[in-house]
Image: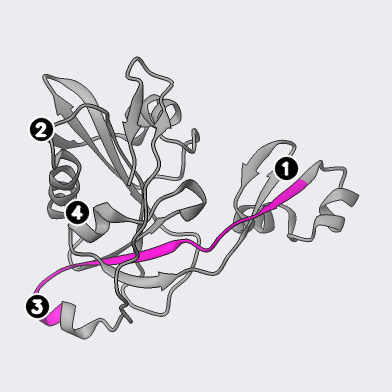
Amino acid sequence: MQVFPINPVDCKDYIVNVHYAHRMPPIEVAFGMYVDKVLRGVCTFSTPASRFAIRPEPYELNRLVIDEGMPKNTLSRFLSICLKKFPHNPAIIVSYADPNYGHQGYIYQATNWIYNGLSNGRKTFYINDVELHERTIYDKYGTTSVPALQEMGLDVRTEANLPKHRYFYLIGDKRFKKSVEIESFSYPKGDNKRYELKRSNPQMILF
């Protein structure tokens, strides 16, 4: 296994076809996991849509996925290498495990992230059958009001979501880590789900 920084464009096909969300998120930092010179995993980071009071402003780990059939602990090794190679130090990383898809965040638990509890439950917005984040809708249309959006001639529907599990990871020396105050809670437990791939492999690993 080899891990390299990669251009976000180079991982688009992998993310769209392999990750359960099947869409390309904003990406500022990307890493690829290669086995025998073949891309077998992707980990990406960007500026989060939500804002936090802690400083420095966190980056969000927004995609983490590897092919099915990798040796045990491959995902945790891959993530650990990505965090060590992360180009900013000190840094705070935030990521979410989505119980709407049966995820508890076990990969973050295995790599010693701080569990910060549940995020606020949000609605999923679909504008003309395209899923969009509330912030993206507000930036583009100046409102997230469904009636107001419909008055603009848009086809709008929403779905209620369960709150997501939120995890933080601190990159830096001991002094920096002690200076960052993040409330922590016991790790959540439960079963993870598996999803079918659009690739040749029958399934993918999700955490």
Task: Report the residue marked by disc 2.
Answer: 2
Q: Residues within 10 Å of mark 2 (few under 14, many from 20)?
A: some
Q: Amino acid at mark 4?
A: Pro
Residues at marks 4 and 2, CA–CA distance in whole angstroms: 17 Å
Q: Position of residue 141 (x, y in %)?
A: 74, 54
Residue 169 painted magenta: yes
- Range of the magenta residues? 157-176
Mark closest to the chain's N terminus, 3 or 4: 4
* Label 4: element kind: loop
Q: Nearer the viewer, mark 3 or mark 4?
A: 3
Residue furthest right in the image? 151
Q: Where residue 60 sits: x, y (%)?
A: 37, 57
- N-term-proximal mark, 4 vs 1: 4
Give how far across and how far down residue 54 sits, in percent.
Answer: 36, 78
For the residues labelled 3 and 4, say whether their Cβ atoms are less than 8 Å apart.
Answer: no
Which residue is nearer to you in this view: 113 or 37? 113
Secondary structure under the numbered disc 2 in the rendered image: strand
User: Which callout, 2 or 1, points at the residue further toward the start of the chain?
Assistant: 2
User: Pointer 3: what residue?
Assistant: 174
Marks 4 and 2 close (CB-CB < 8 Å) = no
Residue 11 horizontal/vertical position (percent): 34, 30
